[in-house]
Amino acid sequence: MAKEKGRKLVAQNRKARHDYHIHDTYEAGIVLGGTEVKSLREGKASLIDAFATVDDGEVWLRSAHIPEYTHGTWTNHTARRTRKLLLNRREISRIQRELASNGMTLIPLSLYFMNGYAKVELAVASGKREYDKRQTIAERDARRDTERALAARNRGE
């Protein structure tokens, strides 16, 4: 079978960009078992409530839900197990420095296949306040209104 090319999105944490200010993003590989990969290739995964931590110089993905493979046997994986993420040492130390500052957290933004390998896009982020969320919504609505007005003007209405 030919090797996959490009990026195939499996799961996305849409609410993360609404709830957090994104500062830096990183691409990390994931250590997975065989049935986990098969379940991901079926497009089944959820990053809701998922987060990452740095413990003893290693990065771990926690609470990510990859459901059990439907055709799996007794060797099937558990759905919400902790999974190791693969980053180089410089990236891990940079993430640790950023997380040391107050109010920063490490969240997964998306889970995808890149050229056949499972990857996670991680972000160092800080939580938004309620008024920040309202401001973001207001900016998005204003941008949408201006785009509609420009489109109507270009159509000659």
Image (spheres, rainbow, N blue to C red):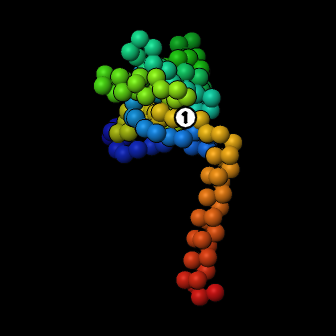
Q: Nearer the viewer, residue 25 or 113?
A: 25
At a point 63% along the width and 29% down the height, the residue shown is: 49
Compared with 146, 30 (above or below) is: above
At a point 64% along the width and 87% down the height, the residue shown is: 157
- In the picture provided, is 21 more to the left or to the right than 2? right
Image location of residue 71, percent across then percent down: 57, 24
Can residue 17 be seen? yes
At a point 55% along the width and 21% down the height, the residue shown is: 62
- In the picture provided, is 73 more to the left or to the right than 133? left
At a point 66% along the width and 57% down the height, the residue shown is: 138
Q: Which residue is mark 1?
A: 126
Q: Nearer the viewer, residue 17 or 128?
A: 128
Image location of residue 4, percent across then percent down: 36, 41
Local secondary structure at mark 1: strand
Quadrant of the image occupied by residue 55? top left
Can residue 34 be seen? no
Image location of residue 135, percent across then percent down: 64, 52
Tell me the quadrant of the picture where the N terminus can be found: top left
- In the picture provided, is 58 more to the left or to the right than 140? left
The amino acid marked with disc number 1 is: Ser
Q: Residues within 10 Å of mark 1 (few under 14, many from 20)?
A: some
Image location of residue 42, percent across then percent down: 53, 36
- In the picture provided, is 153 more to the left or to the right than 35? right
